[in-house]
Amino acid sequence: MKHAKIMDIGDVVKRSGLPASTLRFYEDKGLIQSVGRNGLRRLFDADILERLALISLGRNAGFSLDEISRMLTPHGPRIDRELLAAKADELDRNIKMLMAMRDGLRHAAECPAPRHLECPTFQRLLHVAGKKGRHERRKPVGIAS
């Protein structure tokens, strides 16, 4: 099925699953552009759906809207390979930490110790959680995670 050349905001909402408020916010941030209006309704080129999918992919990977904005040009995506590699490294660190937390929680759920605080495995889980909390508090003001 071929998309219409121009879609109004209602069609974009239906096809993308995003609320109109998000589309207006993205437009205000410069991530997307409308091509005109039909009365009060914004109009978009059909390629808006692909651009919204790229934004969604970036958000799901943990990129900020500012980072995504720098990679999206009016002529299509401009891939910053260094930024992608850094984000992949960050995801690897998060995966490792989340796996340790998962394993610790599973152990705590099955641990025969009378109290969780007496369990060495649960103590390691607390240690990992404490290190993560201290790291987050040390971030300079204005740095988003």
Image (cartoon, rainbow, N blue to C red):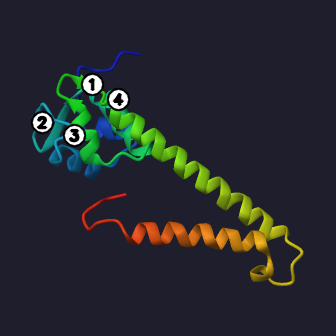
Q: Which mark is in front, 1 or 2?
A: 1
Q: CB under 8 Å between callouts 1 and 2?
A: no
**Mark 2: few/some/many CA within 10 Å (<14, 14-19, 20+):** few
Residue drawn where x is 30% and y is 27% of the image: 79
What residue is disc 2 on? 38
Q: CA distance from mark 1 to mark 2?
A: 15 Å
Label whose residue precedes the other's in the sequence (4 or 1): 1
Q: CA distance from mark 4 to mark 1?
A: 27 Å
Task: Inspect the image, locate mark 1, and give the three-letter code of the amino acid beneath it.
Answer: Ala
Task: Inspect the image, locate mark 2, and give the three-letter code of the amino acid beneath it.
Answer: Asn
Q: CA distance from mark 4 to mark 3?
A: 20 Å
Q: CA distance from mark 2 to mark 4?
A: 39 Å
Task: Inspect the image, locate mark 3, and give the three-letter code of the amino acid beneath it.
Answer: Leu
From the top left corner, tell me how far across and down residue 143 is, in percent: 29, 60
What residue is disc 3 on? 31
**Mark 4: few/some/many CA within 10 Å (<14, 14-19, 20+):** few
Label whose residue precedes the other's in the sequence (2 or 4): 2
Task: Inspect the image, locate mark 4, and give the three-letter code of the amino acid beneath it.
Answer: Arg
Give 35 or 63, whichever is nearer the viewer.
63
What residue is disc 1 on? 46
Residue drawn where x is 47% and y is 42% of the image: 89
Image quarter (top left, top right, bottom left or bottom right) of the N terminus: top left
Disc sitting over residue 80 in the figure: none
Q: Which mark is in front, 4 or 3?
A: 4
Left or right: 44, with 90 as reference point:
left
Q: CA distance from mark 3 to mark 2?
A: 21 Å
Residue drawn where x is 28% and y is 50% of the image: 22
Q: CB under 8 Å between callouts 4 and 1?
A: no
Q: CB under 8 Å between callouts 2 and 4?
A: no
Vertical comparison of 50 with 23: above or below: above
Disc sitting over residue 81 in the figure: 4
